[in-house]
Image (spheres, grey):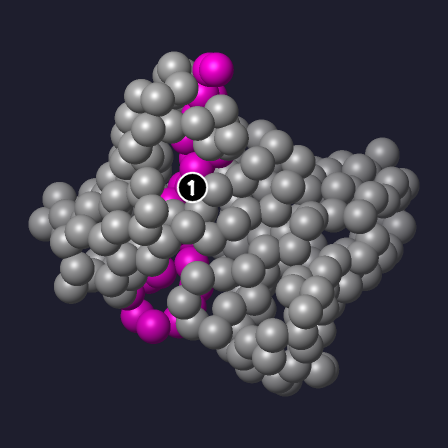
């Protein structure tokens, strides 16, 4: 099993550009999450999903959209990137207990 | 605002010593989880303790939970250089939403 995978691993955007981060899990988990991690801030929850076709807002949802069309995939979209969205993004999945994290996507917005 | 806050923010110890880090939270919870993050990597789940449990062990890890004080501690015994990492606690909101919130972490450095 690959566990949780994220693509891409690195990306540099210009202000105003858009992009989609893809998270995939092969553990048949119902719950999936997107977090961002910034120095000194720990991890902050952006959006999460408790099942296929459902999404919900976390702590810092503004500027992001998500979709969970398939159970194994959770997409995070930035419609118009801003420098404040420079961060490391982590996807996670769980069955309701401990979470399995992906390796992260390092995003820089210039 | 953060649900969980770890203390201390940074800890440096010698190999073989024990390391203790604490987590405080604000609202009622169903469970509390501890994670480890090595530099540049994703988080790895270490242990989950439910609100009706007071202590849990896993190998060299011991976790305690005091719901009256809204706090938890993670003890790593006989630390090794490989334990060098950041450690985070995560709590749910007690309402069964699976909306887990992480603290800011404790950076542990174990010197060989």
Q: Which residue is mark 1?
A: B88
Q: Is residue A74 magenta?
A: no
Q: Is residue B52 above or below residue B18?
A: below
The residue at 32%/43% (across/down) is B61
The residue at 64%/41% (across/down) is B41
Q: Is residue A17 above or below residue B17?
A: below
Give SS at disc 1: strand
Whether residue A1 sits left or right of residue A15 in the image: it is left
Q: Given the image, what chain letter belongs to the residue carrying mark 1? A: B
Viewer-nearest residue: B109 or B2: B109
Quadrant of res B60 = top left
Q: Position of residue A47 (x, y in %)?
A: 58, 63
Q: Position of residue B102 (x, y in %)?
A: 43, 47
Q: Residues within 10 Å of mark 1 (few under 14, many from 20)?
A: many
Viewer-nearest residue: B111 or A4: B111
Q: Is residue B37 visible?
A: yes
Count of numbered labels shown in the rendering: 1
Whether residue B27 sits left or right of residue A85 in the image: it is left
The residue at 58%/30% (across/down) is A39
Q: Position of residue A65 (x, y in %)?
A: 69, 65
Q: Position of residue B7 (x, y in %)?
A: 32, 29
Quadrant of res B91 = bottom left
Whether residue A62 sits left or right of residue B5 in the image: it is right
Q: Is residue B7 visible?
A: no
The residue at 42%/41% (across/down) is B88
Q: Residue at the far left: name it.
A: B68
Q: Which contiguous range is marked in magenta? A: B86-112
Q: Is residue B103 magenta?
A: yes
Tell me the quarter of the image containing the N terminus of chain B. Answer: top left
Whether residue A90 sits left or right of residue B58 in the image: it is right
Q: Is residue B80 above or below residue A53?
A: above
């Amino acid at each position: 099993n690959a566990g949780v995978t994220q693509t891409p691993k690195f990306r540099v955007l210009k202000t105003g550009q858009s992009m989609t981060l893809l998270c995939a899990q092969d553990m048949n988990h119902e719950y999936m999450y997107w977090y961002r991690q910034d120095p000194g801030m720990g991890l902050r929850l952006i959006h999460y999903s408790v099942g296929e076709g459902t999404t919900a807002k976390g702590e810092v949802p503004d500027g992001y959209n998500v979709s969970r069309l398939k159970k194994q995939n959770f997409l995070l979209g930035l419609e118009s990137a801003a420098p404040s969205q420079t961060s490391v993004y982590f996807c996670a999945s769980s069955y309701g207990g401990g979470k399995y994290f992906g390796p992260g996507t390092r995003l820089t917005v210039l | 605002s953060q649900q969980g806050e770890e203390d201390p923010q940074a800890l440096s110890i010698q190999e073989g010593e024990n390391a203790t880090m604490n987590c405080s939270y604000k609202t009622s919870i169903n469970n509390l989880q501890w994670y480890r993050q090595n530099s540049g990597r994703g988080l790895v789940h270490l242990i989950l303790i439910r609100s009706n449990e007071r202590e849990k062990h896993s190998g060299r890890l011991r976790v305690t939970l005091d719901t009256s004080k809204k706090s938890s501690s993670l003890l790593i015994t006989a630390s090794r250089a490989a334990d060098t990492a950041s450690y985070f606690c995560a709590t749910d909101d007690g309402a069964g939403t699976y909306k887990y919130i992480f603290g800011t972490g404790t950076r542990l450095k174990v010197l060989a």
